[in-house]
Image (cartoon, grey):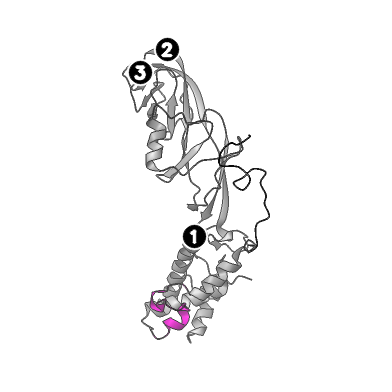
């Protein structure tokens, strides 16, 4: 069973020969304050050490688009006589506009709901009235506990296709600017500005899903899943192994207080690694990673897969003769 914040600190205190604290949170004793901050720092660093199964989270969102009519004026960035502005937001710029007379990569810059007008980032290429304009949201907020993506978990569930990406800045500008790029049927993505950005602009509602590593590693009392990123109550528990945290807390306390004689034994560094540079006990960390979610079974034997056509049964030339 996972130990609470108070129990973890007490274990470290007793093993170092100190008197156990009655409380940690709101305790004004300098040693208790230091233990709390060291333990929170250890937890934050642990989040980045491994894709812990307890931090793996799935996120689902649906694409948003609106079709309104409006008037475009050649060489003007103003759209007028809009049939509606409902749902259009520009902070930060989230919508791209497409339609007759609209140049490629025209972002929505501002909206004046009272005047039924909007400003886009590029001048219109022609003049026209009551034109159908599609306002497609291309940028979506990441989850509040987002730390990092898990590669190749991004899927367009509505199309049953993997979303291609993340694209590089060069690829992204080519997609948005090149005359040769139409985007094709596949959705592509890039994360920048802390927003999940997609291309081409959606013209239908699609369910998008990806997995990510959460930075919420602390579990509230009586809860079952992590809901916050730091220990703030004596009864808080967390997802990491107790022994790893107790040993790590002792190591960081020794490092912070100049107890160099104690650091090597706590660091548990493998041969060739300077123990004074280790901030998380290496042996305990390796054990925790290995036991976290199991591992695939790998065979050292020959793979028993025989494709009907392959390099071993296809001639270099004269195929089919």
Q: CA distance from mark 2 to mark 3?
A: 13 Å
Foreground tag (1 vs 2): 2
Q: Earlier in the sequence, mark 1 or mark 3?
A: 3
Residue 92 in view: no
Q: Main secondary structure of the magenta part?
A: loop
Residue 71 placement (x, y as % from top left): 40, 16
Q: Is residue 265 above or below residue 86?
A: below
Q: Which of the pair 125/78 is nearer the observer?
A: 125
Question: Is label 2 in a helix, a strand or a loop?
Answer: strand
Image quadrant where one finds the N terminus: bottom right
Q: Earlier in the sequence, mark 1 or mark 2?
A: 2
Foreground tag (1 vs 3): 3
Tell me if label 1 and label 3 are in contact, CB under 8 Å: no
Question: Is label 1 in a helix, a strand or a loop?
Answer: loop
Any mark on residue 229, and which?
1
Range of residues picked out in magenta? 261-280
Q: Which of the pair 268/35 is nearer the observer?
A: 268
Left/right placement of residue 25 relative to residue 77 reads right
Q: Is residue 129 above or below residue 215?
A: above
Tell me if label 2 and label 3 are in contact, CB under 8 Å: no
* Residue at figure coordinates x 44%, y 19% from the top left: 82
Residue 287 placement (x, y as % from top left): 56, 72
Quarter of the view holding residue 223: bottom right
Any mark on residue 129, and which?
2
Residue corresponding to mark 3: 125
Q: CA distance from mark 1 to mark 3?
A: 50 Å
Quarter of the view holding residue 27: bottom left
* Residue at figure coordinates x 60%, y 39% from the top left: 157
> Is residue 11 a member of the stretch shown in magenta?
no
Q: CA distance from mark 1 to mark 2?
A: 52 Å
Residue 306 placement (x, y as % from top left): 67, 49
Residue 261 in view: yes
């Amino acid at each position: 069973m996972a130990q609470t914040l108070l129990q973890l600190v007490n274990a470290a205190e007793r093993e170092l020969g100190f008197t156990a604290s009655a409380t940690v949170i709101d305790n004004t004793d300098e040693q208790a304050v230091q233990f709390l901050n060291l333990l929170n720092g250890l937890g934050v660093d642990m989040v980045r050490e491994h894709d812990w199964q307890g931090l793996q989270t799935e996120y689902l969102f649906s694409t948003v688009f609106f079709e309104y009519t409006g008037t475009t004026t050649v060489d003007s960035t103003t759209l007028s006589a809009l049939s509606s502005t409902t749902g259009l937001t520009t902070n930060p710029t989230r919508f791209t506009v497409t339609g007759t007379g609209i140049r490629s990569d025209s972002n929505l810059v501002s909206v004046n709901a009272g005047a039924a007008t909007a400003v886009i980032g590029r001048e219109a290429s022609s003049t026209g009235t009551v034109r159908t304009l599609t306002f497609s949201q291309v940028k979506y907020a990441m989850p509040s506990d987002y730390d990092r993506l898990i590669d190749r978990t991004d899927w367009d569930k509505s199309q049953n296709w993997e979303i291609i990406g993340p694209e590089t800045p060069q690829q992204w500008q080519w997609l948005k600017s090149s005359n040769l790029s139409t985007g094709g049927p596949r959705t592509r993505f890039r994360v920048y500005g802390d927003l999940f950005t997609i291309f081409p602009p959606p013209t239908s509602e699609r369910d998008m899903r990806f997995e990510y590593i959460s930075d919420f590693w602390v579990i509230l009392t009586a809860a079952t899943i992590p809901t916050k990123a730091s220990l703030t109550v004596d009864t808080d528990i967390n997802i990491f192994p107790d022994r790893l945290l107790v040993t790590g807390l002792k190591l960081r306390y020794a490092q912070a207080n100049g107890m160099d004689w104690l650091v090597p034994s706590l660091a548990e560094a493998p041969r060739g690694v300077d123990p004074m540079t280790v901030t998380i006990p290496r042996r305990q960390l390796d054990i925790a990673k290995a036991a976290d979610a199991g591992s695939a079974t790998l065979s050292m034997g020959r793979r028993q897969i025989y494709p009907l056509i392959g390099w071993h049964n296809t001639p270099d030339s004269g195929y089919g003769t």
